[in-house]
Amino acid sequence: MSSEVHLSKEEIIKIIDDLRDVLPESIIEELKNKLSNLKLTKTQLEKIITEVLNEYYNTLVEPGEAVGTVAAQSIGEPSTQMTLRTFHYAGVRELNVTLGLPRLIEIVDARRTPTTPMMTIYLDEEHRYSREKALEVARKIEMTTVENVSKSIDVDLITNTIIVELDPVMLEDKGVTVDQVIKALEKLKIGNIVYDEKNPYVITIELSGEYDLSKLQKLRDKVMNARIKGIKGIKRVIIQRRGGEYVLVTDGSNLAAVLEVEGVDHKRTITNDIHEIEAVLGIEAARAAIINEIVQVLEDQGLDVDIRHVMLVADMMTRTGRVRQIGRHGVSGEKLSVLARAAFEVTVRHLLEAAARGEVDELKGVAENVIVGQVIPVGTGIVELLMRPSSKT
């Protein structure tokens, strides 16, 4: 007979409630209903809870379940209903964002740069509630070139000069001074800068050396693209109000540089460039970004796919410590099985390379066992039944 004291109903309920982070609500309620009226010691209750947890963990996925196939079907079938359009973002004509099937393909192919790179920049406590302060941060981030603040940029072949006529309205809008423009042009080191204070919005660059027409055109392009301020790669910044705070949405992405800008909330700021996230924040952050991006694409299309299928795809793409595509240059092309690689694409090359290296195929996967006509190691196929015939007749 145990000398332990029986727990009261309230104590049993409190111990079970502490499992809310581990077990689903339905199991918590069932445990309360079944156990709260029983006379249990703490040791007995702990044993019951341990058994319940073991059973729960063991049944999260049935042994032998073809999780990869189910995930592929669960994502692949709804994907056939996706649209192929590029949508305007948030009603702003100048800013597009790739959605639907093209974006999904872009993510699982692990493209080095997205078709429409963009960032959502959240601001800190000081800047998020004021549009003026949000604009200050936006001006620091948005890359402003000479072209952005000019009315015209002309080449004079007779005098061998490039004449930049600035737009005072655009200078004010971008928060740029004439001195900043002159400094940006001086950095190019292509000639002598002539500036007349009587005509403050005209800057003349006297080119050093003789140039033909094509070289002059290249110099003009260089002048147009000269960066005055802002972050490289961020072409445009839009200020939006979301749930009581101001948020910046950008055309272009440069996560590392943006996180260093004063006024930016580095904990919430995100980009849609998976490789950039991997480089700046690491592989775990890249995995989370893949999950979020795929789920967002599916939800935008009104498709309901369980997040665990998406998590499995993200796990496969990042399990080696780098972001890999689902394809012949990534997950499928790097399988250990020779036959599985050959069954996917470029069959002859895979077989020749494997033969040259003397590779051995252990036939542990699905594709290779289908090829050789064996039972696939999925479901009941993972069970190996061994018989010992009786010596009795």
Image (cartoon, rainbow, N blue to C red):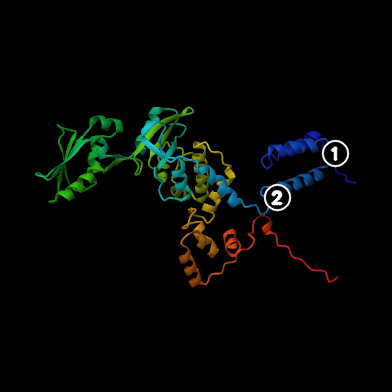
140 horizontally vs 200: left or right = right
| Residue 131: % across, % down | 40, 28
Residue 125 at x, y percent in the picture? 47, 32
**Res 58 label:** 2
Q: Residue at x 25, y 29 (%)?
A: 169
* 89 versus 207 height, above or below: above
The label shown at residue 39 is 1
Q: Nearer the viewer, residue 297 or 58?
A: 297
| SS class, disc 1 | loop
Q: Residue at x 68, y 39 (%)?
A: 24
The reply, left or right, for residue 50 in relation to residue 191 is right
Residue at 19% from the left image edge and 48% from the top image edge? 190
Residue 164 locus on image (x, y percent): 19, 38
Which image quadrant for residue 196?
A: top left
Residue 17 showing in the rendered view: no
Q: Residue furthest left?
A: 158
For badge 1, the amino acid type reads: Lys
Quadrant containing the C terminus is bottom right
Please determine whether, in this image, residue 340 is positioned above or below residue 210.
below
Q: Nearer the viewer, residue 384 or 167?
A: 384
Q: How far, Cα to Cα, is label 1 from label 2?
A: 28 Å
Q: Earlier in the sequence, mark 1 or mark 2?
A: 1
Q: Position of residue 115 (x, y in %)?
A: 39, 45
Q: Secondary structure at mark 2?
A: helix
Using residue 118 as the reference point, say whether residue 381 is left or right of it: right
Does residue 95 show up? yes
Q: Rate crowding at label 2 as few (under 14), some (14 to 19) or many (20 or more) other CA atoms within 10 Å.
A: few
Task: Look at label 2 and name its amino acid.
Answer: Asn
